[in-house]
Image (cartoon, rainbow, N blue to C red):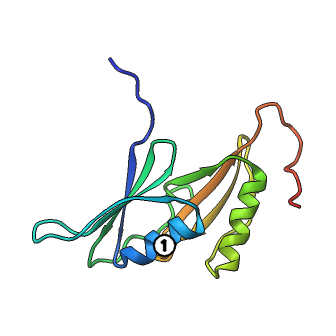
Amino acid sequence: MPDLLGINHVTLSTADLDRLVTYYTELLGATLAFERAATPADPRVAVVDVGGDDHLMIVETADAPTTDLDPLGRAGWGLRVATHRQLCEVREQILDAGWPVGQIETLPTQWTMTARDPDGRPVDVRAHRPRTAASPPPTAG
């Protein structure tokens, strides 16, 4: 049996494809991989590269997406940056753009914050902690 390599994509629905693509590309640093116009049989779709071989498929629909947290009180999915410093930078970018984002929390294996995209959908943004680090997170600066 072949080994799994990871998640290929996560699909998000939105009533405003352009706004959501702009949020993920211009604010969070994703790259637009491709966009497909709507046809009589299929909705408009954009795919953004979020690093490695991972993608968000964004589908434009007439219905508003679900904006609830998962049963653990967090976003049901997340993105990853490389370091705590980058996580702090992303948080500042989100705040500067006027979008909501929570404080950075320290978990046993990572640092995390929950942002809300333009549709109000929660997305966790995380940075893995070094496996040997038992100290508190570094200060930004």
Query: Relative to 140, is 67 above or below?
Result: below
Can residue 42 be seen here? The reply is: yes
Where is residue 8, by image quadrant? top left
Query: Relative to the observer, which residue lies in front, 122 or 71?
Result: 122
Query: Relative to 84, is 15 above or below?
Result: below
Q: Position of residue 121 (x, y in %)?
A: 48, 70
Q: Position of residue 6 (x, y in %)?
A: 45, 36
Image quarter hosting the N terminus: top left
Q: Position of residue 82 (x, y in %)?
A: 68, 46
Query: Relative to the observer, which residue lies in front, 21 or 133?
Result: 21
SS at badge 1: helix
Q: Is residue 91 left or right of residue 30?
A: right
The outermost residue toward the bottom is: 98
Q: Position of residue 81 (x, y in %)?
A: 65, 50
Residue type of the residue flagged with mark 1: Thr
Q: Is residue 21 left or right of residue 114?
A: left
Q: Is residue 36 left or right of residue 56?
A: left
Query: Relative to the observer, which residue lies in front, 75 or 25?
Result: 25
Where is residue 140, by image quadrant? bottom right
Can residue 67 be seen here? The reply is: no
Which residue has dot 1 on it?
A: 22
Q: Residue at x 23, y 69 (%)?
A: 37
Image quarter hosting the C terminus: bottom right
Crowding near the residue tagged with mark 1, few <14, some 14–19, many ≥20 C-alpha atoms within 10 Å: some
